[in-house]
Amino acid sequence: MGGAQSFRATVQPLVRDAAARDASVNDLARSLRAIYGHAYRRADMLVDLRVYRVTALAPQIDQPSGVSEMLNSAVAIGQAMPRYFDFR
């Protein structure tokens, strides 16, 4: 692991906290510079923030109920669709 990747891995707890506070990339970069004296690439910071935000917002669904919910949705959609044939 290179120096930049090592630094990125080291600061992930701080990135996770920033995502929980809904901080921007600028806020995260400012915090990293204040604590470590430098930050990492903005594009990488944005990816990391988005990953933590998505995982925080994703509902925790257990596997069996998720599958049954998907099946129920598919059946409901199938029943709601109009049943006609166009024989033009």
Image (cartoon, rainbow, N blue to C red):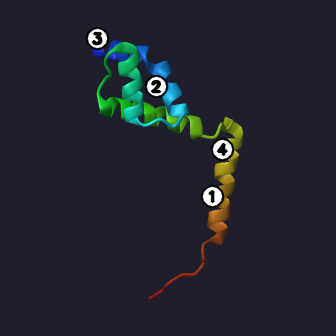
Amino acid type shown at disc 3: Gly
User: Looking at the image, do the residues carrying marks 4 and 1 touch, with CB atoms under 8 Å apart?
Assistant: no
Q: Which is nearer the eye, 64 or 59?
A: 59
State the SS at label 1. Answer: helix
Mark nearer the viewer, 4 or 2: 2
Measured in 3D between alpha carbons, the distance from the residue under mark 1 to the one under mark 2, in whole angstroms, is 38 Å
x, y percent for residue 31: 41, 24
Amino acid type shown at disc 1: Ala
x, y percent for residue 60: 65, 36
- Residue that carries the numbered disc 4 in the rendered image: 67
Mark nearer the viewer, 3 or 4: 3
Residue 75 lies in quadrant: bottom right
- Residue that carries the numbered disc 3 in the rendered image: 3
Q: Spot the residue most to the front.
A: 34
Measured in 3D between alpha carbons, the distance from the residue under mark 1 to the one under mark 3, in whole angstroms, is 48 Å
Amino acid type shown at disc 4: Val
- Residue that carries the numbered disc 1 in the rendered image: 74
